[in-house]
Amino acid sequence: MPTPKKGTPRASATRRFPARILSLLRGSRMLGVRAGTDGHRFTGVWVVVVDERVFVRPWNDSPGGWHRSFLRQRTGAILTYGREIPVRARRVRGERLLDAVDVAYAEKYDTKGARKWVRGLSLPRRRKATTELLPR
């Protein structure tokens, strides 16, 4: 593999989850998220994968919740199928990416009962809180 030219970002700066983990996340209806190291428990959230990237959104963005903890301390863990995986969080910007996350939620959570929650997750305040999870 060639060495990146001077001034170009290294591949490690944009580390991605292995295909095996992405497959688990795609198939998981619920993901456990624990932000920071300050004793938070795992909280169940809906997860989507867009372009091999993992995204979550909070429903209630409370001061003591997982999303605000990720804003203060960018590390945490996810729990899927009994497997705990260390992660770091990154804010998401860009309307095209946020639109793609909206579509991914609508496609993945497509039952009659989920529709109102999917609409709620696409409200501006929740879109603004979209978080990308990356492996640590």
Image (spheres, rainbow, N blue to C red):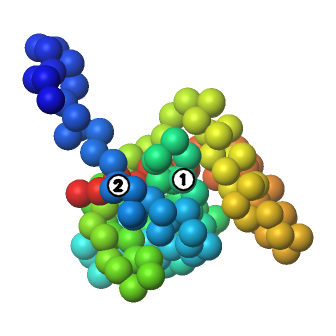
Confirm whether residue 63 shows in the render.
no
Q: Viewer-proximal residue, 80 or 32? A: 80
Mark 2 or mark 1: whose residue is earlier in sequence? 2
Q: Position of residue 69 (x, y in %)?
A: 38, 63
Q: Is residue 74 left or right of residue 3?
A: right
Which of the labelled discs sits on residue 17, or is there none? 2
Which of the labelled discs sits on residue 66, or is there none? none
Residue at the location (52% across, 42% down)? 51
* Residue at the extreme front: 1
Q: Position of residue 106 (x, y in %)?
A: 75, 55
Screen quadrant of the N terminus: top left
Q: Element type at marker 2? A: loop
The residue type indicated by label 1 comes to Val
From this view, report whether residue 87 is shown above or below residue 31: above
From this view, report whether residue 81 is shown above or below residue 36: below
Residue at the location (44% across, 77% down)? 80
Q: Viewer-proximal residue, 114 or 127? A: 114
Q: Element type at marker 1? A: strand
Residue at the location (53% across, 58% down)? 56
The residue type indicated by label 2 comes to Phe
Q: Residues within 10 Å of mark 1 (few under 14, many from 20)?
A: many
Please give the residue where the numbered disc 1 appears in the rendered image.
Answer: 49
Screen quadrant of the C terminus: bottom left
From this view, report whether residue 27 is shown above or below residue 123: below
Tell me the CA gap for discs 2 and 1.
11 Å
* Residue at the extreme right: 112
